[in-house]
């Protein structure tokens, strides 16, 4: 018996990336642009998504994939819009994962009418750490960071802030009531992810949301033109 | 984070490459920027490999330092973490040259000697 050395040089997360590529192929075949929407719990993803569904309903065929550990609260909130909404629960056969991965997203694809969707928004599980590590087959990634979370968060969670193509700074209507240092936040954001586009918004009052809608429109158009 | 899931994923790759042979060593390259705790991964590895061809395989981890290439002056400097800052000119806009790896580098298997 002798020992043989085998050279591998392969990504340890190959399995997830392989499934993400398979998702990507299915999305491309159906002409769907996919956005992965991440944030900490309570930053305002679902409300921002509601605003987007209302605003873009007549120009884009939107679809939503909701990721939560448990329950269908978010999917229920969005159900009255025209867009198809599918809920994934990570505790239903996936072990209560704190993030969505390519496999979980793949399991939900058959429930979505992909041929009738131009832009699919995947609302990830509220979590500033893990979702950044797992590709799901998306075209673009966006995150919401609310002003109530503090200006130091880009420094504390650099991978998430670096992983995203666009940052929505939400709840700016609350600024008069907070000691939040917006300049410091933006400087921290720039230090951790130089040049990342961002928008100052309030999902509640509607302020600044055009930048959010325009970003979604741009991503969808780029996805469509690249196909 | 998710050292258990990562260990499971590594095992999948290892068993695939080992093609049924008993595995004695698995060598990983883990970049400094990855959110992985080596001791946690080692522990998870002992759990996931039980009853498999990699049950007694040692897990070796080579840490790869984070190096950033400055977009302003071009210099590559070692980075302790984020935010990146060029060690030469102090600029913040750097591209990651190394540090993001999470690789199965090589493995060793028992190869029955053929007569």
Image (cartoon, coloured by chain):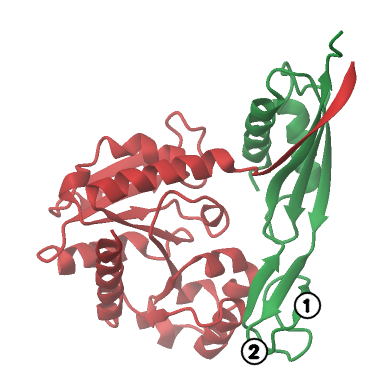
- In the rendered image, residue A162, in percent from the top left (x then y), is placed at 55, 69
- In the rendered image, residue A102, in percent from the top left (x then y), is placed at 45, 43
- In the rendered image, residue B70, in percent from the top left (x then y), is placed at 68, 82
Tell me which label, 1 or 2, sits earlier in the chain. 2
Check the rendered structure and report the hue given to chain B: green
Q: Which residue lies furthest to the left in this view?
A: A58
Instruction: Give residue B27's quadrant in the image.
Output: top right
Above-or-below relation of A223 to B102: below
Label tally: 2
Q: Residues within 10 Å of mark 1 (few under 14, many from 20)?
A: some
Q: Residues within 10 Å of mark 2 (few under 14, many from 20)?
A: few
Q: Where is mark 1, residue-wise? A: B77
Of A200 and A119, nearer the camera is A119
Parent chain of label 1: B
Q: Residue furthest front?
A: B115
* Residue beneath the point at 56% across and 83% down: A190
* Residue beneath the point at 52% across and 85% down: A186
Query: Going by the image, does A162 lie left or right of B110?
Result: left
Q: Which mark is residue A108?
A: none
* Residue beneath the point at 67% across and 59% down: B100
Query: Going by the image, does B70 lie left or right of A116?
Result: right
- Chain with red colouring: A
Parent chain of label 2: B
Instruction: Give residue A166's quadrant in the image.
Output: bottom left
Q: Where is mark 2, residue-wise? A: B72
């Amino acid at each position: 018996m002798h020992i043989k050395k085998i050279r591998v040089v392969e990504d340890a997360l190959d399995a997830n990336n392989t499934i993400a590529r398979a998702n990507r192929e299915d999305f491309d075949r159906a002409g769907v642009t996919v956005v992965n929407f991440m944030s900490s719990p309570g930053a305002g993803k679902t409300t921002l998504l509601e605003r987007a569904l209302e605003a873009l309903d007549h120009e884009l065929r939107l679809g939503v994939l909701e990721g939560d550990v448990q329950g269908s609260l978010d999917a229920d909130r969005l159900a009255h819009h025209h867009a198809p909404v599918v809920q994934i629960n990570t505790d239903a056969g996936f072990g209560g994962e704190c993030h969505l991965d390519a496999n979980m997203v793949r399991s939900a694809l058959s429930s979505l009418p992909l041929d009738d969707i131009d832009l699919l928004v995947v609302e990830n599980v509220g979590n500033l750490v893990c979702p950044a590590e797992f590709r799901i087959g998306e075209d673009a990634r966006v995150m919401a960071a609310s002003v109530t979370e503090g200006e130091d968060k880009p420094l504390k969670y650099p991978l998430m802030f670096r992983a995203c193509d666009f940052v929505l700074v939400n709840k700016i209507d609350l600024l008069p009531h907070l000691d939040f240092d917006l300049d410091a936040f933006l400087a921290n954001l720039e230090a951790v992810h130089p040049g990342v586009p961002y928008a100052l918004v309030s999902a509640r009052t509607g302020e600044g949301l055009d930048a959010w809608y325009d970003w979604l429109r741009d991503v969808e158009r780029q996805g469509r033109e690249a196909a | 984070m998710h050292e258990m899931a990562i260990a499971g994923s590594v095992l999948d790759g290892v068993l695939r490459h080992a093609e049924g042979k008993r595995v004695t060593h698995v060598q990983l390259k883990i970049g400094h920027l990855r959110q992985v705790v080596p001791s946690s991964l080692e522990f998870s590895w002992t759990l996931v490999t039980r009853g498999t061809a990699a049950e007694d395989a040692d897990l070796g981890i080579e840490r790869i330092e984070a190096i950033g290439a400055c977009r302003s002056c071009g210099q590559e400097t070692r980075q302790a973490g984020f935010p990146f800052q060029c060690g030469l000119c102090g600029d913040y806009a750097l591209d990651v040259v190394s540090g993001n790896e999470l690789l199965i580098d090589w493995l060793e298997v028992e190869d029955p000697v053929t007569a």
